[in-house]
Image (cartoon, rainbow, N blue to C red):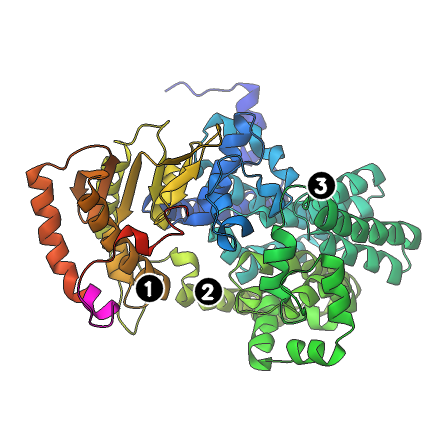
Amino acid sequence: MVQLQLPVFKLFSLQNLSSETRRVVLLAALFFAIALVFGFNRYFTFFASYDQGIFNQVFWNNLHGRFFQSSLSSVLSTNVVHDGKVPEVYYHRLGQHFTPALLLWLPIYALAPNAATLVLIQIGLITAGGIVLYALARHYLSPALSLMMMAGYYGANAVLGPLFSNFHDLSQIPLFIFTLLLAMEKRIWWLVWLMAALTLIVREDTGIVLFGVGVYMVVSRRFPRAGLAMCILAFSYVVLATNVLMAAFSEDVSRRFMMERFGQYADGDSASTLETLWAILSNPVRLMGQIFSKPQVKVFYLLVQTLPLAFIPFLSPYAWAIAGFPLFQLLVQQGESPLAIHIRYAITLVPGLFYGTILWWSQHSHRFQQRFRRFWIGCIVLSLLIMIPYNPHQVFYFAIPTSFQPWIYVSLPRQWEHASHIRQLVHQIPPEASVSATTYLVPHLSSRREVLRLPFLQVRNDQKQVVDVDYLIADLWQLERYRVAFPLERAHFAQIVPLVDSLLDQKQYGILALEDRVILMQRGISTSPELLAAWSTLRQDYEPLLRVLRGGTSGSPMASNFPIFRGA
């Protein structure tokens, strides 16, 4: 067999790389490949959920020149949630989150414009962050220590949890901040300020991460003037974005997000970010009560955050100079999600903790002995072992039961079999048609202008007319299976089954297909006797469950009992 000896093949051959570079490339490639397998399996077996659909629709609309518009985001807007208005296809998501940096990845998305591409983009961004982290570590540390830093990053719960979640804007943070810090070390100031600008436009609140970097530059006395400028820039941008730029699109910041996260500090039903900041700082007793509430949860959170670094960040004041500000933002919020290690917010602490650890090792490299290296490797392994039982975002659903009590488990073959039925029905929906779907079907239908989540059935189109959607599709198998453990699935199951009944009674929609307890309905058609009989049989199976959910009452509620979902 003739072997190709072209220069291009030699250029990309691992044999031509140094042993150090080869280890880095192999580690990054291994991480990328494994993450891609798990990420794609999660997506193609219909475990990606609503946010994946939101971001995909935003990307799809961006590709078609309708920048940052999304009917799925409109469903979550204060106009719909609080005022009961109809979702709009031209609603601008910039009123909820100011995320212009997403446009950077639009050329990649354009190659394959669907929600699966966002899985690839997110894994690529986080993998690239690890490579830049290695380069940053090498500025101070030996190859062996730098490789351990990279391995700790790829084994961190605060990285892996957000990695396997639905696509999110914060996945850009490690890459941008590590690049900024590396450029700072190399004194490449144009790149520092470019990365600072990109960090700001990731999201309206990522200026808090940048503010921490500026504080480090000041307190370390390395670049005090640049650090002060960065602090001023970061704070000013957060204020400008949340009070002016986002307010130009909607009232979601003041009426919804500030209230949901910081409502415990406010007196009214709305507040700007400046009013919220003043309310926090002017109520020190309430603030301290919030910070020190549930101490066991917060201690565990910090331990898991620092575990893949062998707890070294606790010894590095510079780690907390940077990470302390995004941590403070999480500590003062109400609810469970801010301090959930597998949710996207956790990744905002990663750059500060890892950079602070690099600085500590730069002064204590003599302590990196074989015994400590084994301990560190054990910490990374333990970090991975902690993650698996948590089954973040159900990525390991085929290995770990979704719930132990009550028991909920779906095998990989059964889930793929069910997914094949869903795909057959999804393919019957024309790409230009409007559709409303249950949560886990939304991402696969979100590359279109008009898409909603059930039980919403009406949308305001580009002509500003309120219209009924053309199709609705509901995965009742998923809702039925998971309702026993999850209130949201239980509520949706109790809403959607009677909604199907009422739509059939009104003859507004007919059943187009029914497979494996996934129902597809189309507006304006009649249901065949065979499909009507199949639904009647399934409905009889569901009646005892619905009776329990209704508290023992009988009968099916009509659509008028759900006015908000009908667009009233």
- Per the image, the residue denoted by label 3 is 198
| Res 317 seen here | yes
Marks 3 and 2, the one that precedes in the sequence? 3
Nearest to N terminus: mark 3 or mark 1:
3
Q: Nearer the viewer, residue 452 or 408?
A: 452
Where residue 212 appears, as percent x and y from the top left, is 77, 58
The kind of residue tagged 2 is Met
Q: Secondary structure at mark 1?
A: loop
Who's the residue at 71% across and 41% down the image? 198
Query: Which contiguous range is marked in magenta?
Result: 546-554
Q: Which residue, given by chain and number where applicable, does mark 1 sit on?
A: 402
Up-down: is 137 above or below 88?
below
Horizontal side of residue 560 vs 544, given as left or right: right
Residue 387: assigned label? 2
> In the image, what residue type sits under mark 3?
Leu
Secondary structure found at label 3? helix
